[in-house]
Every structure is written in structure tokens, then in C-alpha cells.
Amino acid sequence: MTEMSIEDYLAHGGKLTSPGNVPARYRGELMRLMASFVDSELAASAGFAESINDAPGIKSRIAAARIVLEKADHAEKVLTVMAEFGANTDRYEGVHPWAARTERDADIGAQRQGGDMRLSVFHYPLEGWVDAVVMNVLQGLAANVQLAEMAQVSYQPLAEVFRKIAPVEARHAELGVEGLSQIAASEEGRAAAEASIAYWRPRVAAGFGTANSARFERLSKLGLRQRTNEAMLADWTATVDALLADLTLI
């Protein structure tokens, strides 16, 4: 009987449990996935930290501080897996401008900027508490969809880390929804929220990637993707539409 190659093993749903003997292409794609997550979490944590003092009450300040802390913790958890693959993690110990943002009216699409791998949405600045809450809700709901996908990656130790992270990230979105429902209770708050939704919604959507992506096929064969960008975006869109309808924000 012909021995199955690692590539064929992965293409047929196989799982890997250690860095040893992984194909170079697999390692490269896995490292890219992890770097994007780590950098996005650190950029999100740094950006939201600046909004803590905009929080209107002590409970919201505590919630914002918890989100800042836990996102940094999630980055560290995935960074530990990266280190097992020999990644140079020293750059995460130095000073990096994680809080750096582009101009508010910039339109960078899904393009990454600067010297890190954060999702493009984390290059845009927050403007006040309502804006921070709206962004947290929309991106938090996107993270729920994305983490459900990442929890199925073929590298089992990383999949397990994502499964532990997912419920905590889901709670971040829930905290955001609680804050957004309070904001939407007033006419002034509703108007501010609607303006922020119009700004952030297309920018969060860009994080799902392009339709008919050629990379999806490559990643699917490596067991690093299960669902298409279009399917994930559709799930997020339906969830957002339902929430905004409940809050009479659409």
C-alpha cells in the first residue's frame, strides 16, 4: 500500500500535533494565521485602552479594562504556539506602535499597513465612547465567526487554544451589546451609534477577505480553512442585521 503524504493526509482531514516534520508551506501559512491573530489582538487591546477614560461609568470602565487585558492575554497564548515553531518572538518584547492608526477618512480596504500583520480594521482610529462600543460590537461578532473557523484548524494545539479563547471573546461582544443597547435608548445616542455603524460596518466586513479567494483553496487543502469568505461574511451579516433590528438601529 502506498504511504500517504502529509499533504494528502491534511487534504483528507488529518490533524497534526507537533511542529516536527510539517511541510514548509503548511508552516508558512500557519505562522501567517497566528501572526495575524496575535497582531490584531495586540492592536485591538492598545486601541481600546485609549477608550477606557471615555467610559461613562465605573462598570463600563471595568468592562473596557477587562477587554484590554484579555485581548493581550489571548495574543500571548497564541504567541506561545508560534514560539514552538521557532518564530522570533523577541519583537513582541520591545516597543511597537500597536496603538498607531491611519487617518479616520482613509480607505485601505483589506490591505495590511505598516510593520505588522493586524487586520486592516485595526488601523482605523476610534472617536469617543459610542464609536468604541460600536466597533467592539461589530468586530466582536466578526471574531465569533472567525474563531469558530479557526478552532477547526488542522494543527490541534492551536485549535485547542482558539477553543479556549472563543468564549472569552464572545463575552467581549456581549459586553459591547449591553453598552450599545444603553446608548440606543436615547435619540442622541441612537443617532451617534448609527453614524458609527455606517463607518465601521464596511471596514469590519473587509476583514473577511475577498470573494472567490484563490488562497482559500490552498488553505483548505492544508486543513487551515473550512468555510469560504463569502459564507462567513453572510453569517456575520445576518447576525448584525438581527441585532441592529432588535435595537431599532436600522
Image (cartoon, rainbow, N blue to C red):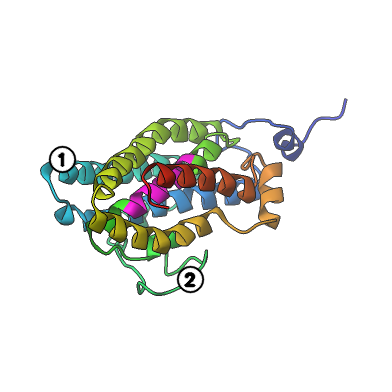
102 above or below 12? below
Which of the numbered marks, if any, corresponds to residue 143?
none
Residue drawn at (11%, 43%) of the image:
58
Which of the numbered marks, if any, corresponds to residue 108?
2
Which of the numbered marks, if any, corresponds to residue 59?
1
Toward the right, the furthest residue is: 1
Residue 184: x %, y % from top left: 28, 49
Q: Nearer the viewer, residue 177 or 28?
A: 177
Q: Quadrant of residue 167?
A: top left
Q: Is residue 96 left or right of residue 159?
A: left
Residue drawn at (23%, 61%) of the image:
128
Q: Nearer the viewer, residue 150 or 203?
A: 203
Instruction: For the N terminus, give its image quadrant.
Output: top right
Residue type for callout 2: Ile
Give the residues in magenta. 134-144
Residue drawn at (32%, 65%) of the image:
125
